[in-house]
Amino acid sequence: MVCAQDVHKRYGRDEVLKGIDLDVAPGEVLCLIGPSGSGKSTFLRCINHLEKIDAGRLSVDGELIGYRERGDLLYEMHEREVCRQRASIGMVFQRFNLFPHLTVLENIIEAPLHVKRESKAEAVERARALLQRVGLREKADVYPSRLSGGQQQRVAIARALAMQPKLMLFDEPTSALDPELVDEVLAVMRGLAEDGMTMIVVTHEMAFARDAGHKIAFMDGGVIVESGPPGEVLSRPRHERTQAFLARVIGGQH
């Protein structure tokens, strides 16, 4: 579903991604872990072309993202084509980014109505089903300011799912939440994983990575230091950098 080949990204002289190679199979949940500033969020944003890569290739479901290939050369796509690709990739950020002037239901149907040109009846029906799925059916007519952070993040997940994406990207979706609200968001994400949604999750929640992830990749300094099944990476990390990071993070979560 996702194939990254020697992906590089720089900001001026600062090289943030230094050659990322990664494959994610359909239905697989990949958890990206690592210290702040290691390039995890930048890589996630490159997958849906919110950030342009400087070298390498990134494809989703066999289609190059953001570029068209002619011969040996890559040409950047028009913004309209990029938006079409982006419509099939759901993304949930640290901050919920809900429209404050729209109700929960209106937030969820906005993109299906205006991007996919769905009928209002169809969009509303799916939105209500998604609210049921994230445990917020009774909040359809409420404005975001009346919701807790965990509820807002669950609405943000429902909004991303309303576009019926083939891939979901989560950028530390629980890091802005109070600790008691984290589990309700992770429960929704576990449900998605069980239903076979392909997901890439940047997270510091090691229990979630262990239980819901099929694969963990540890990033540091713009490279993937090691990757493998959760039990292997979390219990028997091979590299000193991974060992030091996990000792610090897991120790802090006890």
Image (tube, grey):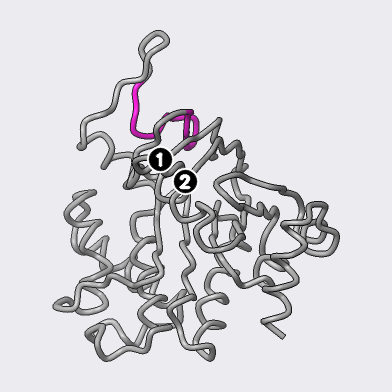
- Residue at 34% over, 44% down: 51
Query: What residue is pinned by disc 1?
Result: 10
- In the picture as drawn, the residue positioned furthest to the front comes out as 13
From which residue to which does the magenta span run? 56-68
- Residue at 53% over, 82% down: 182
Q: Position of residue 111 (x, y in %)?
A: 23, 58
Decide which of 53, 208 is in the foreground and name it: 53
* Above or below for 11 versus 131: above
Q: Identity of the amino acid at label 2? A: Val
Contact (Cβ within 8 Å) of mark 1 with mark 2: yes
Q: Residues within 10 Å of mark 1 (few under 14, many from 20)?
A: some
As for residue 247 lying within the magenta part, the answer is: no
Q: Position of residue 3 (x, y in %)?
A: 55, 35
Q: Identity of the amino acid at label 1? A: Arg
Label whose residue precedes the other's in the sequence (1 or 2): 1
Please give left or right for residue 253 compared with residue 203 in the image: right
CA separation in Å, label 1 and label 2 = 5 Å
Please give left or right for residue 196 compared with residue 128 in the image: right
Query: What residue is pinned by disc 2?
Result: 16
Please give left or right for residue 26 compared with residue 46 in the image: right
